[in-house]
Image: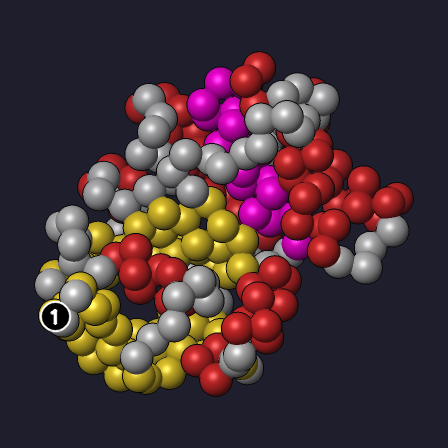
């Protein structure tokens, strides 16, 4: 069986935060590879550093030391401006509370990341229509978030995350605000993104049922990545 090339390579990563005069270590010597087309779940108790690690991979936060290579780019060496530009075309974000703009329609919410690109209006429309079709919401494109169920809002958020065709998708508790049926629907959609579109997904979750949908489960505890991991298949 051919080994997939890592799309994320993390080496000797450290991160801490300052609280007054106190330095709080959050991540300690994290080394991790994530293969292209992988669906990985990050689990661990509150305060274990899961969301911090996700934010570092996504280029939202900066490490104290160590390297994070996404594809051919070591993002730890980018300036804030370079990082923002890199993030806009390489990372898709899926949040627990959707983060949709209530005064914009589903179509307009999905189109938002494309307004930062050089695409024409016609090209943007094609991309948005395709993304909404992927999440089975073509018939809801003119609806506002308040007219959609929680599961439908999360599907709009996923369409927005994939519309730029990013290298990786990062999901922070994507089913945390959904009922069980809607959560299963969203997890099934994420599986499709991996299997049918070859997307790489890194998901933080507290829910063991959600984690089981991933290919690989990694555990963080007190900022340390456990040496073992388990296949969810």
Report the magenta residues as a range: 148-164
Of 209 and 154, which appears nearest the observer? Answer: 154
Name the image quarter holding residue 220.
bottom left
Residue 170 horizontal side relative to residue 26, left or right: right
Residue 49 sits inside the magenta stretch: no
Of 86 and 102, which appears nearest the observer? Answer: 102
What residue is at 27 percent from the left and 45 percent from the top? 205
* Residue hosting label 1: 22
Label 1: element kind: strand
Q: Main secondary structure of the magenta part?
A: helix
Residue 158 sits inside the magenta stretch: yes
Residue 40 horizontal side relative to residue 209, left or right: right
Name the image quarter holding residue 119.
bottom right
Is residue 69 something one can see in this rendering? yes
- The extreme top residue here reads 147
Is residue 5 something one can see in this rendering? no
The quarter of the image holding the N terminus is bottom left
Residue 37 horizontal side relative to residue 104, left or right: left
The image shows residue 109 at horizontal and vertical percentages of 64, 36
Q: Is residue 47 above or below residue 208?
A: below
What residue is at 41 percent from the left and 34 percent from the top? 97
Name the image quarter holding residue 164.
bottom right
Q: Is residue 230 above or below residue 103?
A: below
């Amino acid at each position: 069986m051919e080994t997939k090339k890592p799309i994320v390579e993390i080496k000797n990563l450290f991160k801490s935060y300052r609280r007054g005069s106190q330095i709080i270590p959050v991540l300690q010597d994290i080394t991790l590879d994530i293969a292209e087309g992988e669906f990985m779940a990050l689990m661990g108790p509150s305060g274990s550093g899961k969301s911090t690690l996700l934010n570092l991979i996504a280029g939202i936060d900066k490490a104290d030391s160590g390297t994070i290579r996404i594809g051919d780019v070591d993002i730890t060496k980018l300036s804030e401006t370079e990082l923002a530009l890199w993030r806009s075309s390489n990372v898709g974000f899926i949040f627990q509370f959707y983060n949709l703009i209530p005064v914009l329609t589903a179509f307009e919410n999905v189109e938002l990341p494309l307004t930062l690109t050089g695409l024409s209006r016609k090209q943007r429309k094609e991309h948005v229509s395709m993304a909404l079709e992927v999440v089975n919401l073509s018939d809801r494109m003119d609806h506002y978030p308040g007219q959609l169920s929680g599961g439908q809002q999360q599907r709009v958020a996923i369409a927005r995350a994939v519309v730029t065709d990013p290298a990786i998708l990062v999901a922070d508790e994507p089913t945390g605000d959904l009922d069980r049926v809607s959560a299963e629907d969203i997890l099934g959609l994420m599986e499709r993104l991996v299997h049918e579109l070859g997307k790489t997904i890194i998901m933080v979750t507290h829910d063991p049922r959600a984690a089981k949908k991933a290919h690989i489960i990694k555990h963080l505890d007190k900022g340390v990545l456990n040496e073992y991991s388990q296949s969810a298949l």
